[in-house]
Image: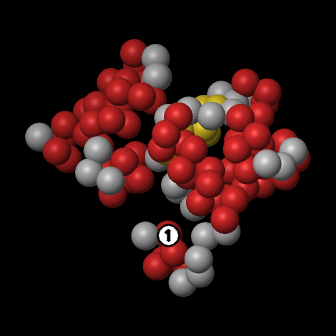
Amino acid sequence: MEEKRTRQPLPVDSLIALTLLRQERRLDTVQLARGIQKDEAAARPVIERLVEAGLVEAHGVKKGRTYTLSPKVYQQMGQAADYVRQAGFDSIQQEQMVLPFVRGHG
């Protein structure tokens, strides 16, 4: 989907990051760096480009920041409800996520 939108293939590191997120559900930059076999300084721009593209969501700040696949990706995979289960937000945020989901999916 992203490759069609940009008309360019995703870089290998981005594909690896997306695969890792699909398997692990939540990663930090240390885990991502290990997965793409580069240091954290190289891993950070990879994941941030995926965030900017709307394929990945960032949670938290600075060193505690983790990443998950975005709701858009879960929806494309036909697993929209899995996003709500794995996101791990507090109760107010959960309510704000569930209401649009119910409106859109019944």
Task: Quarter of the image for the C terminus: give it.
Answer: top left
**Residue 104 place in picture, x, y as percent:** 20, 47
The answer to whether residue 24 is left or right of residue 28 is: left
* Res 61 → quadrant: top right
The answer to whether residue 38 is left or right of residue 70 is: right
**Residue 93 place in picture, x, y as percent:** 43, 25
Tell me if I can see residue 51 in this picture. Answer: no
Q: Residue at x 39, y 53 (%)?
A: 72
Q: Residue at x 43, y 70 (%)?
A: 1
SS class, disc 1 = helix
Q: Residues within 10 Å of mark 1 (few under 14, many from 20)?
A: few
Q: Residue at x 42, y 28 (%)?
A: 86
> Which kind of residue does numbered mark 1 sit on?
Glu
The answer to whether residue 95 is left or right of residue 37 is: left
Question: Of 93 and 17, which appears nearest the observer?
Answer: 17
Asked if 61 appears above or below 43 in the picture, the reply is above
Give the residue at the far top of this rendering.
Answer: 91
Question: Of 106 and 68, which appears nearest the observer?
Answer: 68
Give the residue at the far left of this rendering.
Answer: 106
**Residue 25 place in picture, x, y as percent:** 50, 35
Q: Residue at x 59, y 81 (%)?
A: 8
* Res 76 → quadrant: bottom left
Question: Of 75 and 35, which appears nearest the observer?
Answer: 35
The answer to whether residue 96 is left or right of residue 10 is: left
Question: Of 53 and 13, which appears nearest the observer?
Answer: 13
From the image, tell me which residue sits under label 1.
Answer: 2
Tell me if I can see residue 17 in this picture. Answer: yes
